[in-house]
């Protein structure tokens, strides 16, 4: 069973040879940027990583107007994971480039080391990220947030790290000493790790500011929480953010967005959080899906909703059932290229095959109404593109249809009527002459 943890974007799996990041045999954290925190190659050839002290933070160079914006495909840029652990600790201005390995930041360092030491025992693929912690707030220093569990543990200290990892991360049980609290609403984490990458340092704070303003103006305070976080992978996609919260079905999901600008904030709040609809234009991926599954899910959402189209057609035409066909039919009435649904009309044979080939809508209705008293059977046929003719095995138009539905009883009844009329006429003629 594959297991592991992720320190701000990198995974460490069980000993199956598939770990995408470098780990020494003793589990020590490697210090190089390319070995810590990478999502789908997001750090490859990344010239803006670590130690950029140039002071250039203009929007044109590192912000929303930089040339690389929208230059890369976003979908499928999130590696598979099943759980995300956030440690609330200080603020982005104080975070070193690798806060999980900083010598003087004991709590995140010990937690990261404990996770690595137990990596082969962790049942769920787990990410580990730092988010902002401010004492006296809902996310104080030492608090731990876990998704999709939607749980908060209060006041983790370096003395509790081993017990916490054992009970919560390895055994998947509760750490009762941490006074677990259930999280509600939506939680947005924005990468604002300035010392790690200038792009996140420029884009992140601007997004957080706009998010907090719009949340306040929409009356969403208490329902939507926003926090800056450390590197999550994909600096080149800045601004990066993750939204955790229940979807329309109540299932907790984690959706990643990239190339997010302040102008996208109202859309994310109204569409993603308000309506539960994914904003595909800037969507990177989702917790619990592989990169291939993310691609597939994205394509399915972009595909037209055929049921909705059919319902619209039904309402417009006013029929109980409507045939929707794309492509052409073969002689037996099977669809060759396209989609076909059942239709009740004059063009359906007793064999349940249906290939109405192009009588018009008006003609089909007239065929149904032609002789309701005498005809209950279905006539097999096929429809071509807009010709009111029918094949030899189908409907031939209104006149042909009328003759096909004419039965022997109709002939007898007609002859009787004609005979009666003739008898009356003859009798009347004889009466006139005799008078």
Image (cartoon, helix red, strand yellow):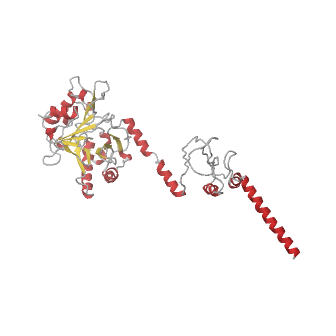
**Which residue appears at 75% of the width and 55% of the height?**
411
> Measuring 85% from the left and 73% from the top, which residue is drawn there?
431
Q: Position of residue 421 (x, y in %)?
A: 79, 65
Asked whether residue 401 is in view, the answer is yes
Residue 62 visible in rendering: no
Name the quarter where the N terminus is drawn.
top left
Left or right of residue 342: residue 48: left
- Outermost residue, left side: 159
Q: Quadrant of residue 429?
A: bottom right
> Farthest right residue?
434
Q: Is residue 306 above or below residue 13?
A: below
Between residue 71 and residue 260, name the one nearer to us. Answer: 260
The residue depicted at 55 percent of the width and 55 percent of the height is: 319
Q: Measured from the top left, where is residue 244 in percent x and y?
A: 28, 44
- Residue 265 x/y as whole percent: 31, 52
Which of the two residues, 9 or 73, is positioned nearer the viewer here? 9
Residue 143 % position (x, y): 17, 42
State which quarter of the image contains the C terminus. Answer: bottom right
Residue 353 vertical position relative to residue 37 in the rendered view, above or below: below
Residue 246 vs 51, above or below: the answer is below
């Amino acid at each position: 069973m594959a297991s592991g943890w992720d320190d701000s974007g990198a995974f460490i799996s069980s000993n199956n040879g598939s770990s995408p990041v470098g780990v020494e045999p003793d589990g020590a954290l490697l210090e190089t940027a390319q070995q810590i925190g990478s999502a789908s190659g997001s750090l490859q050839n990344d010239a803006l990583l670590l130690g950029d002290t140039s002071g250039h933070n203009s929007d044109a160079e590192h912000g929303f107007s930089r040339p690389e914006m929208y230059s890369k495909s976003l979908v499928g840029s999130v590696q598979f994971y099943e759980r995300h652990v956030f440690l609330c600790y200080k603020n982005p201005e104080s975070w070193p480039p690798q806060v999980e390995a900083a010598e003087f930041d004991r709590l995140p360092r010990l937690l990261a080391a404990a996770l690595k030491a137990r990596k082969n025992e962790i049942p769920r693929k787990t990410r580990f990220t730092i988010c902002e912690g401010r004492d006296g707030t809902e996310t104080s220093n030492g608090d731990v947030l876990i998704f999709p569990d939607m749980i908060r543990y209060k006041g983790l200290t370096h003395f509790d790290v081993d017990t916490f990892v054992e009970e919560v991360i390895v055994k998947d049980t509760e750490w009762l000493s941490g006074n677990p609290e259930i999280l509600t609403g939506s939680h947005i984490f924005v990468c604002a790790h300035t010392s790690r990458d200038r792009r996140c340092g420029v884009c992140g704070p601007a997004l957080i500011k706009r998010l907090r303003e719009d949340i306040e103006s929409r009356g969403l305070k208490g329902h939507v929480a926003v926090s800056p976080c450390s590197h999550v992978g994909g600096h080149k996609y800045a601004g990066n953010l993750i939204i955790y919260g229940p979807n329309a079905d109540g299932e907790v999901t984690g959706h990643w967005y990239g190339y997010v600008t302040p102008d996208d904030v109202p859309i994310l709040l109204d569409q993603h959080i308000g309506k539960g609809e994914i904003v595909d234009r800037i969507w990177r991926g989702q917790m619990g899906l592989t990169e291939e599954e993310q691609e597939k899910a994205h394509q399915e959402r972009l595909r037209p909703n055929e049921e909705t189209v059919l319902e619209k057609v039904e309402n417009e035409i006013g029929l109980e059932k409507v045939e929707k066909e794309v492509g052409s039919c073969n002689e037996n009435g099977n669809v060759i290229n396209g989609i076909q649904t059942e239709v009740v009309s004059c063009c359906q044979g007793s064999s349940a095959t249906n290939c109405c080939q192009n009588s018009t809508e008006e003609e089909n209705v007239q065929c149904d109404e032609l002789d309701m008293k005498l005809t209950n059977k279905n006539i097999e046929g096929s429809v071509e593109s807009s010709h009111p003719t029918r094949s030899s095995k189908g409907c031939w138009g209104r006149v042909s249809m009328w003759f096909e539905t004419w039965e022997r009883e109709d002939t007898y009844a007609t002859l009787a009527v004609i005979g009666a009329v003739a008898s009356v006429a003859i009798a009347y003629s004889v009466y006139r002459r005799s008078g």
